Image: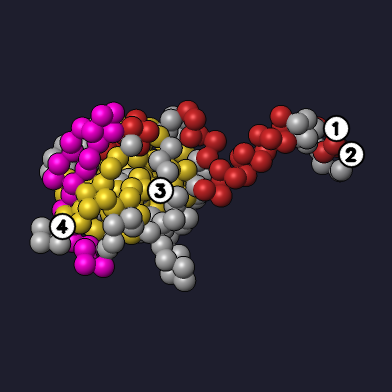
């Protein structure tokens, strides 16, 4: 589990095919001496397991499954690409962002990056299968960054980036057209799933029931 607060922007050194999967190696400013093989680290919002550590070069290696490659922008990241990194939460850590599972739901293209006074407004296309999880002032993880939805459009959403987020994440180097990883709010997923099951079982609230309860 993660919070969406980025600890470091690493640099992809290599992406090497391994069958239908891939091996990723990246350089990081994280304290590699404190990291162990088997630790979970969110890489652009995708939860990956540390496979090897090179303390001398400050680099980490990961095995990236085909499922991860098919759902994230790690499949197309080129050597030299900046990657947002966050170590997994430890029991007792402060939750300063929002609950982020590290399970990317979809990728989508950046539509616009515009300065709004002291902030940056980022507008991203909203995939159809993610739209039910997007609500104004709700949480969304973009490349692993915990952000708040400022506005919703029919086929896109916008978030505001404070200067600190702009300077300390990979979005500083992003351009319109770039794909970003998106993860919908975890609590929203549970609520949506429960409602889907209620509807499938015929347990949804009807207009007649609402009328009998005094509404409408």
Q: Secondary structure at mark 3?
A: loop
Q: Earlier in the sequence, mark 2 or mark 3?
A: 3
The residue located at (40%, 41%) in the rendering is: 104
Q: Earlier in the sequence, mark 1 or mark 3?
A: 3
The residue located at (26%, 68%) in the rendering is: 34
Residue extending farthest to the right is: 212
Q: Secondary structure at mark 1?
A: helix
Q: Earlier in the sequence, mark 3 or mark 4?
A: 4
Number of the front mark, 1 or 3: 3
Q: Which residues are magenta?
A: 13-34
Do we see residue 68 in this rendering?
A: yes
Residue identified by numbered label 4? 54
Q: Secondary structure at mark 2?
A: helix
Residue 196 location (% of width, % of height): 66, 34
Number of the front mark, 4 or 1: 4
Residue identified by numbered label 3? 102
Q: Secondary structure at mark 4?
A: strand
Neighbours of disc 1 within 10 Å: few (<14), some (14-19), many (20+): few
| Residue 56 vertical position relative to residue 159 in the rendered view, above or below | below
| Residue 185 vertical position relative to residue 93 in the rendered view, above or below | above
Q: Earlier in the sequence, mark 4 or mark 2?
A: 4
Kindly indicate the quadrant of the structure image that contains residue 157.
top left
Q: Which mark is residue 208?
A: 1
Neighbours of disc 3 within 10 Å: few (<14), some (14-19), many (20+): many
Distance between the alpha carbons at the discs numbered 1 and 3: 41 Å
For this rendering, which residue is in front, 3 or 155? 3
Q: Which mark is residue 212?
A: 2
Residue 84 location (% of width, % of height): 27, 51
Number of the front mark, 3 or 4: 4
Q: Are marks 2 and 1 in contact (CB under 8 Å)?
A: yes
């Amino acid at each position: 589990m993660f919070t969406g607060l980025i600890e470091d922007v690493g640099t992809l050194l290599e992406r090497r095919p391994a069958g239908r999967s891939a091996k990723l190696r990246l350089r990081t400013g994280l304290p590699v001496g404190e990291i162990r093989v088997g630790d979970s680290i969110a890489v652009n919002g995708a939860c990956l397991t540390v496979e090897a550590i090179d303390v001398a070069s400050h680099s980490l290696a990961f095995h990236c499954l085909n499922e991860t490659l098919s759902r994230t922008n790690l499949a197309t990241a080129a050597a030299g690409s900046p990657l947002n990194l966050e170590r997994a939460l430890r029991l007792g850590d402060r939750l300063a962002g929002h609950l982020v599972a590290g399970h990317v739901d979809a990728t989508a293209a950046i539509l616009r990056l515009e300065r709004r006074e002291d902030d940056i407004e980022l507008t991203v296309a909203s995939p159809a299968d993610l739209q039910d999880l997007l609500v104004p002032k709700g949480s969304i993880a973009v490349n692993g960054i915990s952000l708040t939805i400022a506005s919703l459009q029919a086929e896109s959403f916008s978030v505001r980036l404070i200067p600190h987020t702009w300077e300390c994440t990979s979005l500083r180097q992003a351009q319109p057209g770039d794909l970003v990883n998106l993860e919908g709010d975890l609590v929203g997923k549970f609520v949506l799933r429960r409602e889907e099951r209620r509807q499938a079982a015929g347990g949804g609230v009807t207009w007649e029931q609402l009328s009998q309860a005094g509404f409408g």
